[in-house]
């Protein structure tokens, strides 16, 4: 939800400057004037809604973008999770004859991690699995 409203192009340095300016303007006031300022609807409309919130959104966007995993890392995480299933093909709906004992010989020969219920499932998943096969085998 936050990423949908992210004004990332605003720049984090400018956003940080705006946020500090708004917060400092209130902190520098004596206590009675702070209370008066914080109870003013104009302060909330102009300073908070129009200046501070967009700046904080921009900063949050920058933090989220910096922590977002690379697409390759996401694919590897998904592949590791799928490897715990009886059949690593995410679109497999075959429940007939799928048991741990029967799948021992149907492991991927490249990584040895992913298991499949049939040759058809392995072939169907090859396009996605081939991108992470080597990484799964080395981890």
Image (cartoon, helix red, strand yellow):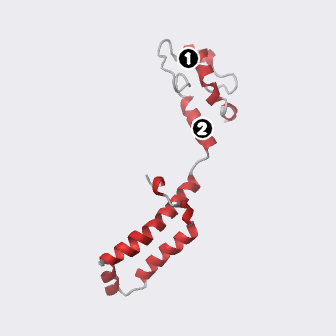
Q: Secondary structure at mark 2?
A: helix
Res. 88 image quadrant? top right
The x and y percentages for residue 23 are: 44, 76
Residue toward you, 115 or 28 = 28
Q: Residues within 10 Å of mark 1 (few under 14, many from 20)?
A: many
Identify the residue shown where x is 33% and y is 81%.
37
The x and y percentages for residue 128 are: 62, 30
Res. 8 image quadrant? bottom right
The x and y percentages for residue 10 are: 55, 65
Identify the residue shown where x is 38% and y is 75%.
46
Residue 63, above or below 70: below
The residue that mark 2 highlights is 75
Q: Earlier in the sequence, mark 2 or mark 1?
A: 2
- On the rendered structure, is 23 left or right of 34? right
Q: Residues within 10 Å of mark 2 (few under 14, many from 20)?
A: some
Cβ atoms under marks 2 and 1 closer than 8 Å: no
Residue toward you, 66 or 2 = 2
Res. 36 image quadrant? bottom left
The residue that mark 1 highlights is 117
The x and y percentages for residue 96 are: 48, 12
Identify the residue shown where x is 49% and y is 75%.
20
């Amino acid at each position: 939800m936050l990423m949908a409203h992210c004004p990332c192009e605003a720049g984090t340095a400018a956003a940080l400057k705006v946020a500090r300016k708004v917060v400092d303007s209130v902190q520098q006031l004596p206590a009675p004037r702070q209370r008066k300022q914080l109870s003013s609807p104009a302060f909330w409309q102009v300073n908070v809604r129009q200046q501070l919130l967009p700046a904080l959104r921009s900063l949050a966007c920058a933090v989220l973008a910096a922590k977002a995993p690379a697409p390759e890392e996401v694919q590897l995480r998904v592949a590791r999770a799928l490897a715990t299933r009886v059949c690593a093909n995410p679109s497999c709906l075959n429940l007939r004859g799928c048991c741990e004992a029967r799948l021992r010989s149907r492991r991927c020969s490249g990584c040895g991690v992913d298991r499949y219920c049939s040759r058809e499932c392995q072939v169907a998943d090859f396009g996605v699995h081939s991108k992470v096969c080597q990484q799964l085998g080395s981890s």
